[in-house]
């Protein structure tokens, strides 16, 4: 900015420093939304729920709240289904990262059971980030978790009425415990 030729009917001007410089910083750089999940599988438990915690992160804080949607789907060779989650529904919802913050957690509640089954996997995906003062690019917005089966298959002994015989063979470790 430069000033020159001041004019006034009733004044005389002497110009001193008449130039100034300013820099406009480009703050329109998009913010990246990304997701990370549990590092290892989590036992499902026999009753109640267990929590699989995911973290949604921004590459830098926004000056206003950032909201986004999330959804769980079964995936992999043994995909989890609605019955594997609290209330028998695949979890979906909206989460918010507060202004000035860079992350929030999303807790997915897995329903425990006593059914012997394969380990099951599911994926959490983020979408539709919105903030009043930011634009977004999507980073890695999916993460996978494993529901680890912690149930044990029992041994079934069957026979007919009469003179059935049950034979037990032990190894050396069992004999030492006797």
Image (spheres, rainbow, N blue to C red):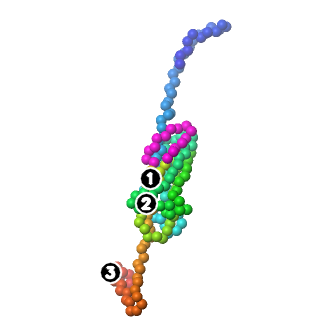
Determine the residue positioned at 52% across, 41% down: 61
- Check the picture and name the quadrant holding the C terminus: bottom left
**Relative to 173, is 151 above or below?**
above
Q: How far apart are marks 2 and 3 (CA)?
A: 41 Å
Q: Residue 77 lies in what quarter of the image?
A: bottom left
Q: What element carries label 1?
A: strand
Query: Which mark sits nearer the N-terminus, 1 or 3?
Result: 1
Magenta span of residues: 127-141
**Mark 3 residue crowding within 10 angstroms, few (<14) / some (14–19) / many (20+):** few
**Relative to 14, is 152 above or below?**
below
The residue indicated by pointer 2 is: 79
Q: Residue 168 lies in what quarter of the image?
A: bottom left
Determine the residue positioned at 51% across, 51% down: 70
Q: How far apart are marks 1 and 2 (CA)?
A: 14 Å
Contact between labelled residues 2 and 1, with CB atoms less than 8 Å apart: no
The residue indicated by pointer 1 is: 143
Q: Along the line of sight, which residue is nearer the eye, 135 or 172?
A: 135
Residue 136 part of the magenta-drawn span: yes
Q: Along the line of sight, which residue is nearer the eye, 102 or 147?
A: 147
């Amino acid at each position: 900015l430069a000033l020159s030729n001041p004019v006034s009917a009733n004044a005389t001007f002497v110009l001193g420093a008449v130039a100034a410089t300013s820099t406009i910083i480009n703050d329109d750089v998009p913010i990246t939304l990304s997701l990370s999940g549990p590092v290892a599988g989590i036992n499902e438990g026999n009753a109640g729920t267990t929590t699989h915690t995911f973290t949604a992160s921004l590459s830098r804080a926004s000056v206003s709240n950032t909201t986004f949607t999330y959804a769980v789907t079964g995936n992999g060779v043994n995909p989890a289904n609605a019955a594997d989650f609290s209330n028998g529904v695949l979890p979906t919802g909206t989460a918010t990262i507060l202004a000035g913050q860079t992350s929030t957690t999303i807790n997915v509640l897995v329903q425990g059971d006593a059914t012997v089954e394969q380990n099951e996997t599911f994926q959490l995906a983020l979408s539709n980030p919105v903030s009043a003062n930011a634009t977004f690019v999507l980073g890695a917005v999916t993460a996978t978790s494993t529901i680890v089966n912690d149930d044990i298959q029992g041994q079934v002994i069957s026979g007919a009425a009469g003179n059935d015989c049950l034979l037990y063979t032990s190894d050396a470790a069992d004999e030492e415990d006797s």
